[in-house]
Amino acid sequence: MSVSARKKQRLSPERELQRTPNNVTPITPFRRAVSAGPTPGSRRTPIVRTPGTVRTPRGGPATRPLPSRRVAPTTPHAIRALRERANAARTPGNNRRRSGRIQRETPRDILRDLSRALARDSRPIEPSPQVLPQRTRHSALDLPDVEDGPHLAAPRLSMPLENMYDDEDSFHSAPPRQSLLPDLPDDVDGETIQSLEFGRRAISEDPRFMFGGRQSERFGDLSELGAVEEEYEIDGTFINRRADGLLDQAIEEALDEDDTTTQIRALAGPRDGRSSDVNLGVFGEGEDDTEDPTFRFLIPERIRAPAREDAGEEEQEAEDDQGSGLQDPPNDMDLATNDQEEEVTAALTQGNPTEDDGMLGWESDAPVDDDAELAAYREEESAMDRSLHTNSPERSFTGQQRGVRKAKEYLVSEHGIGYPSFPAAPVKKLALNFMKSQGSKAQLNKDALAALVNTTNDFFEQIGIDLAAYAQHAGRKMIEESDVIALMKRTRKTTDNSTSFSLAQKMLPRELLQQLRMEPPIKLKGQKRKRLNPIQEEDDDDD
Amino acid sequence: MPPTLYPRTTLKKIIKAHSKRPLSRNVDVLIFLNYALFMQELINEAVIKSKQGGERGVSGKSVKRVSGGVLRKYKG
């Protein structure tokens, strides 16, 4: 019985294995295609449960196709992981994990398997050179061959020089000009001017010629041409010409811009308001009798100021020579510019009254026109002056002074230790308080306050040195209250009937007084008492 | 009155720089007391001086003139 029972027991699992369709694990391939459908075993996973588990799953194994059924997870991570796994199992293409025990197959896997199977037999294809498939590969390329036709003419890489400027349709309306001024009059010293180049534009794009030009740039030309009788139209900062008759002439002049026009334009340059034009030293150009080439370049204002007067006069003469008789507008224009420059230079060079006087006289000598245009123009100039004055060096100088004062605030003691200046605000407050209590007007001007701050710094220096000496004398490193009290006593600030406390009560606010009283521990109070008592005793003795 | 009548740290820094010694805790209050006395005297003298000179208000010049004498008075 026992043996047979054992045999039965031994045999029975094998029989069951054969009987049950669930245990076909050897049959199921290790890799199964998705399309093959679920394996019978994967659907109904055998429930692995330890016998000790009390909890039973809520639903049967058929209701919930969870792959693993364990104890319900308690930690949030486990819960989440389980949920994710369940979701992944529910998703249709559940090839979530490749590294899992059951790897799902994709077409790519199948192909890879195929390639592995075929890899032993197959050999790499060596492409034999074939011309034909290349030709017929693309139908779009099957055009009549370009190389079949006759050779095209090679493109010329250079432009035909002869035709370049003759071509009327071309946008090259003018040849490029040299940057050097080509020919100068003999009397002009050409050494420095050769490197001069004024701002240029393509003539076709030049807005000055598109809109008839800015009249102020061309007064020199006009005076030369005798076009002074023209009427002007003041439009904001621009003075436009009303009659446009001279436009062609102006364009012509601009096209073959000879030296005189450049010079005169340069003379009119400062009206642009561009200081660079002024600084180019254009006055040298217009003069007939210049021998000083230094005029053409940046000259410090102080040096230039006296010479500028002569230059102005010479310029005027030059214009007189050049132009026709009646030249009031251009002359006055020049006058105005000179005025402007004079004002600027006067602002730059302070304290030259004689020069200013000379300038004034010169101005009064000149003919003064009361034209409305001129007045307007002069106003304009004055506006320009204002803008120039903002940049005048005086202000920057004051700014520098301020900066110096700021930098001065950090002082260095004789020990080489830097220290800040005592701030002015508490000094002022204290001083005003004292002045008020004294009965005088509580007013302090700036330099008085500065003097007070200076004196304050001196005082602290002095008291610091003194206290250091006192502390050293006492054999201490640290400066203590007793040192200050000794100092006050020595300077007769604390006398018989005024202690430091009474003084502090008088002078100091309550917070500081409290700190003074609270802070020093018993020891210091004792010191003070000691110090005070002998004095009183002495007084008593004296009495 | 502001919470602090004077910048304590600045004053401590100044005194330390001049004496090259550490300060005990509340010396600066006493020093400031001394300074207040000094300032009072200075202002008094300056006002007197400016009145003698017939100035309106106190000028920097009168302060400067007076300051030397007052400083000497406070020299320990």
Image (tube, coloured by chain):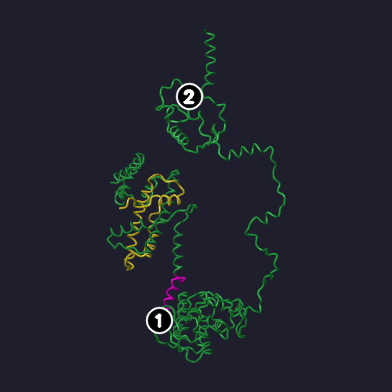
Chain colours: A green, B yellow
In the rendered view, does A432 fall on the left or right side of A106?
A: left
| A195 relative to A497, above or below | below
| Residue at screen point 71% across, 55% down | A131
On whether disc 1 and disc 2 are found on a single subunit, the reply is yes
- Element under label 2? loop
Around disc 1, counting alpha carbons within 10 Å, would you say few (fewer than 14), some (14 to 19), or many (20 or more)? Answer: some
Q: Nearer the viewer, residue A239 or A380?
A: A239
Nearer mark to the viewer, of 1 and 2 = 2
| Furthest-right residue in this view | A129
Q: Would you say residue A48 sits in the magenta stretch? A: no
| Furthest-bottom residue in this view | A325
| A21 relative to B11, above or below | above
Q: Which residues are magenta?
A: A379-394
Picture coordinates of residue A33, whole percent (x, y): 55, 35
Residue at mark 2: chain = A
Q: Nearer the viewer, residue B66 or A159?
A: A159
| A95 relative to A138, above or below | above
Mark sitting earlier along the chain (1/2): 2
Picture coordinates of residue A518, whole percent (x, y): 33, 42
Picture coordinates of residue A441, whole percent (x, y): 29, 63
Main SS of the magenta part reads helix
- Element under label 1? helix
Q: Calculate the distance from the C-alpha at mark 1 to the C-alpha at mark 2.
A: 107 Å
Picture coordinates of residue A452, whole percent (x, y): 38, 60
Q: Give the amino acid type for the residue marked by disc 2 in the picture.
A: Val
- Disc sitting over residue A376 in the figure: 1
